[in-house]
Amino acid sequence: MLDSAFFNQVFWGNTIKDYFLFGGILLFGLVFKNIVSKLLSKLLFKLFRNFSNQSHDEAFVALLVKPIEVFILLTTLYLSINQLKHPLEVTVFHYSKLIGKVKESIPVSIGDCIDRIFLFGIILSFFWIILRIIDFITHVLLFKASLTANKSDDQLVPFLKELLKTTVIFIGFFTLLGFVFEVNVLTLITGLGIGGIAIALAAKENLENLIGSFTIFLDKPFVVGDLVKVDGVEGTVEKVGFRSTRIRTSERTMATLPNRGMIDGVLENLSLRNSRKVSFVIGLTYETSSDSLRKIISEIQDYINNHEGTSDDGNASFKSFGDSSLNVEINYFVTVLDSVEFLKIRQEINLEIMEIVVRNKSDFAYPTQRLISDRPLGNAATEKEVGNDAMD
């Protein structure tokens, strides 16, 4: 009887028993939230066992432990606080703007405010858990995609991840409006239909970029990992998102281009080329005889066509008479696409061209001018070859 009387004593509108329940539930949540969160994570993983494998167990638990901890903590706080009565009420008066008088009074208790705050947090943590599950699913899909030779799935998985997470966020937003703020969601959505035109106009650019992302996935002008060039930007595609595409340039910077520009502009997929073109002009001195020039051109063309790293459609030809040189144009295609190997082959060919020129008793020209003047001694004209610097 004494124990019952003790626990039934009332302080600030609540019995000692209520306070013990409050403290017990709160202590349980604080002490066991970490253990319970890991246990729930492993139980949830069993639902995805067929989809994944045991090696992804730790990744799944790591993703879900924190949001489940928050969910358990908020739930235990909510349950513990609900063991207490909150007698304090606040009356909110609604004034009419037309007559300046009280129209109605609405009593609001502290308990109602606490319920709404915790309901807000619990709903947020619940959708946080869903977002983390989506992260885990895409993590597994990306792992499986990395095992295949097809790069389309590497590009599709991040896009689907953003699409699902955006959908979940919208659902969570309307859930909060409906359950916490007691907004009629159907009426709100219907009202949005009235202002839909204005919203569409305001979001016109974003909608165009979103349509552009779908066009990229359907038409597949490139995939993640391709080397592309668009609007003067050249680099490797790293990600295709809702609004933009991210490209890693040769300077290792990250360029972000809107998806609309990726499909509207002139896009070159350099990864789809079957060779790399090299084109340049060399200048030979005017002392080079026509026979030497023919031999030089013939040997250069034979060398570039017979090289193992080039195609057989290269050519060398006498292009023009320059101001200080005989210009020979050289064009060839390197069939090796790797950048490092391409540079090695181009260097090897350039060095051989130098040897061919020297071997045929010629030399490379540099800008010069001839100065012809009459000397007072004799009628013979003398010639002097000077560089450009001497003429300044």
Image: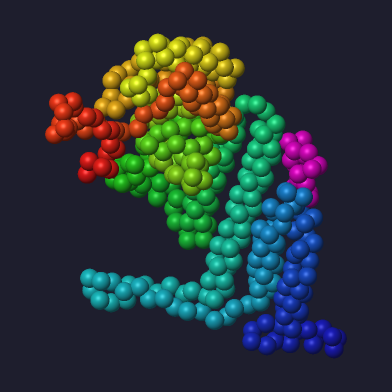
Task: Point out residue 378 in the picture as x, y percentages from the top left corner.
Answer: 16, 28
Please give left or right for residue 317 compared with residue 302 in the image.
left
Image quadrant in which the N terminus is located: bottom right
Residue 204 x/y as whole percent: 33, 41
Label count reads 0
Which residue does the image show at 26% across and 42% down from the upper left? 390
- Please give left or right for residue 358 compared with residue 32 in the image: left
Which quarter of the rendering shows the C terminus?
A: top left
Q: In the rendered image, which quarter is residue 362 located in?
A: top left
User: Residue 9 at x, y = what percent?
Assistant: 74, 87
Residue 207's image quarter? Answer: top left
- 46 on left or right of 287: right
Q: In this rendered view, identify the residue nearer to me: 268 or 31.
A: 268
- Can residue 53 be found in the magenta stretch? yes
Residue 164 colored in magenta in the image: no
Q: Is the residue 19 above or below the residue 234 in the image?
A: below
Q: Is residue 386 left or right of residue 289?
A: left
Can residue 129 be seen at all in this image of the molecule? Answer: yes
- Between 108 and 227, the one nearer to me in the picture: 227
Give the residue drawn at x 37%, y 24%.
284
Looking at the image, residue 377 lies above or below residue 19: above
Residue reaching furthest front? Answer: 377
Nearer to the camera, 33 or 310: 310
Query: In the rendered view, would you say 300 is above or below 387?
Result: above
Q: Position of residue 340 (x, y in %)?
A: 58, 33
Q: Which residues are magenta?
A: 42-57
Residue at (51, 32) in percent of width and height = 227
Prevalent SS, magenta region: helix
